[in-house]
């Protein structure tokens, strides 16, 4: 039986890093049953567009405000 894993990524203006981050998470997905959740903390760059367009299997959460790292993790969980 495959283990189940939830991966939570909290972002803020992370367009330069989110693509490689998600690619590395999905690289090993054949070995793990997983869900990937990205909570974006009110970015003003293209982070959310990259997630939506290139990684449609990711659950994207966009709160109306920046929750900070801890708050973002709590909301995503």
Image (spheres, grey):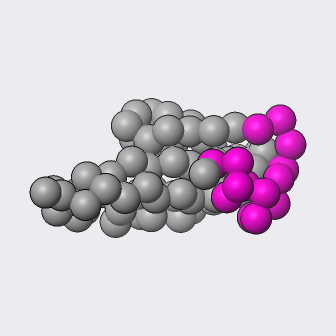
Give the quarter of the figure containing the N terminus.
bottom left
Of all residues shown, which one is farthest toward the right? 65
The part of the image, by quadrant, that contains residue 48 is top right
State the residue at coordinates (78%, 57%). 71
Residue closest to the eye, 9 or 50:
9
Q: Is residue 47 visible?
A: no
Of all residues shown, which one is farthest toward the front? 1
Depicted 48 relative to depicted 69: above or below: above
For residue 5: magenta?
no
Task: Find residue 30 and report its horizontal and vertical position in percent.
Answer: 15, 56
Depicted 46 relative to depicted 74: above or below: above
For residue 64: magenta?
yes
Q: Main secondary structure of the magenta part?
A: helix
Task: Find residue 6 and report its horizontal and vertical position in percent.
Answer: 43, 55
Indicate left or right for 3 with 67 as reference. Answer: left
Task: Find residue 64 and report its horizontal and vertical position in percent.
Answer: 83, 35
Indicate left or right for 46 with 33 as reference. Answer: right
Indicate left or right for 73 with 64 as reference. Answer: left
Task: Find residue 76 and report its horizontal and vertical position in percent.
Answer: 63, 48
Q: Is residue 64 visible?
A: yes
Residue closest to the eye, 4 or 66:
4
Q: Which residues are magenta?
A: 63-76
State the residue at coordinates (50%, 38%). 59
State the residue at coordinates (63%, 39%). 61
């Amino acid at each position: 039986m495959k283990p189940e894993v939830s991966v939570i990524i909290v972002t803020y203006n992370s367009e330069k890093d989110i693509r490689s981050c998600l690619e590395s998470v999905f690289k090993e997905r054949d070995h793990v049953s997983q869900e990937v959740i990205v909570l974006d903390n009110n970015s003003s760059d293209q982070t959310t567009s990259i997630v939506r367009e290139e990684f449609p299997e990711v659950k994207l959460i966009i709160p109306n405000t920046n929750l900070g790292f801890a708050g973002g993790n709590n909301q995503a969980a």
